[in-house]
Image (cartoon, rainbow, N blue to C red):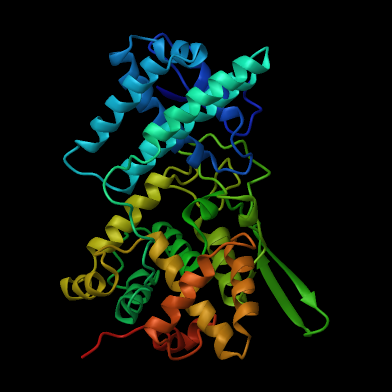
Amino acid sequence: MLANLRSGPLSGIKNTALLLDSCGLPRYWATVWSMFLPVDLAESTVRKKLSHIESFYQHSDEILGPGQLDDALAAFDLEALNAALEGFFFVIRNQSRTSPASEDRWQTTLRFVTEILQRVTRSQPDQESIWELHGRLERLELLHSKLHVGSRHRPEQIRSLPSEVVEFLYELLDPVSNVNPFRSAASRWRVFVLFILMLHQGLRRGEILLLPTDAIKTSFDRRLQENRSWITVKYNEYEDDQRYSMPGIKTASSIRQPPVSQMIALVLQEYTSSYRGRANHSFLLNSQKHRPMSTEGVTKIFQKVSSSLPKSLRSILQSQTGNESVTPHGLRHTCAVVRLNQFLAEGVAMDDALQRMRVFFGWSRDSDMPLRYARAVFEDRLASVWRDEFDVRISVLRSLPRRSS
């Protein structure tokens, strides 16, 4: 069972997710393994990995007996471990429907077993025992490393949202729109802030949910002789997050301070001062019950937005993106494609433009993500530059691919 530690001696650890057995006791080797995960992993990523491993523990409890997986790992019992791994692989493989998540579950499980056995090998008292166990470990890795659940999935094909869909979303989610599907003014402004931060700033869902009310800062730029604003993307330093599905920062590179336009700064200021309402927490986005908004809440919002799309637009969306729904990541894709087009249109060299993209969107210096967006730019043949000001919305629409006639 996957659980969170909210109090007690381990509550100060950044990632407090752990696995418990049927008696409520921590699963030993899973706890050890999670302690050596990279410290910059988001808690949501840690929870996903542990949920995969918990599936393997539950399978092993049935095959080997309750609690026997930890014993088999400690004793380097390859016969028991091979039986558990092979059975688990076929359970995943024989599901009626497999997906990339199925392959992730298998690879995470295999990596867990091999990394734990590596630690057991290094703990042996003499070199002869180490060599013997190392050879046995190599045979286990050779036996299972070539197994895959289905075909290896191709990298995600990045497509920005069609211009017709973006235009409709602007009209639909305008807080004063007559067709806005959300009832109260507070809900409308909350959704509008989500939409703008994803489409114009390219923020991930988890990043937005961590923002405090004072995330945007403004100062006077003496060189440009005008006010400049930026948004700080990092963990909320004012709060001990108590949400069950805690949002997180994906990697250390995701902590950043991208610039924002004055119009976006004014939108957030209007929401905070007039529509956020009173709450006993500092997170920017507030739920209807005045609690920090949850990831599940954002999912429901986008389900409602997607259901409001006319059938004709869902058809266009499906044909150009392969998806009939509007998603947070789809908005981030759109932002990235148009931002890169903007840099290139301004005469920025490709290498410099890609590095600017890494900084703006929170990718590491060696990430290949900007190259994938570069391909999307040229495939979509974006025609113009996206400006931040809302009163030149037509620039946004012209920067997006239109349906071919």
Quadrant where the C terminus is found in the figure: bottom left
At x 48% / y 44%, what residue is drawn? 290
**Eyeballing the image, is 261 above or below 118?**
below
Name the side, left or right, on which 69 lies relative to 307. right
**Eyeballing the image, is 28 above or below 222?**
above
Name the side, left or right, on which 297 lies relative to 113. left
Q: Between 307 and 191, which is closer to the camera in this rendering?
A: 307
**Eyeballing the image, is 143 above or below 291?**
above
Where residue 357 appears, as percent x and y from the top left, is 59, 71
At x 39% / y 20%, what residue is drawn? 81
Where residue 64 appears, as percent x and y from the top left, is 33, 12
Q: Count the numbered circles shown.
A: 0
Judge whether residue 282 can be spotted in this image.
yes
Q: Between 175 and 6, which is closer to the camera in this rendering?
A: 6
Quadrant where the N terminus is found in the figure: top left
At x 49% / y 41%, what residue is drawn? 45
Where residue 172 appears, as percent x and y from the top left, is 32, 72
Residue 121 in which image quadrant? top right
Residue 168 in which image quadrant? bottom left
At x 30% / y 62%, what residue is drawn? 305
Where residue 381 appears, as percent x and y from the top left, is 40, 87
Name the side, left or right, on which 334 lies relative to 240. left
**Eyeballing the image, is 179 above or below 213?**
below
Judge whether residue 244 can be spotted in this image.
no
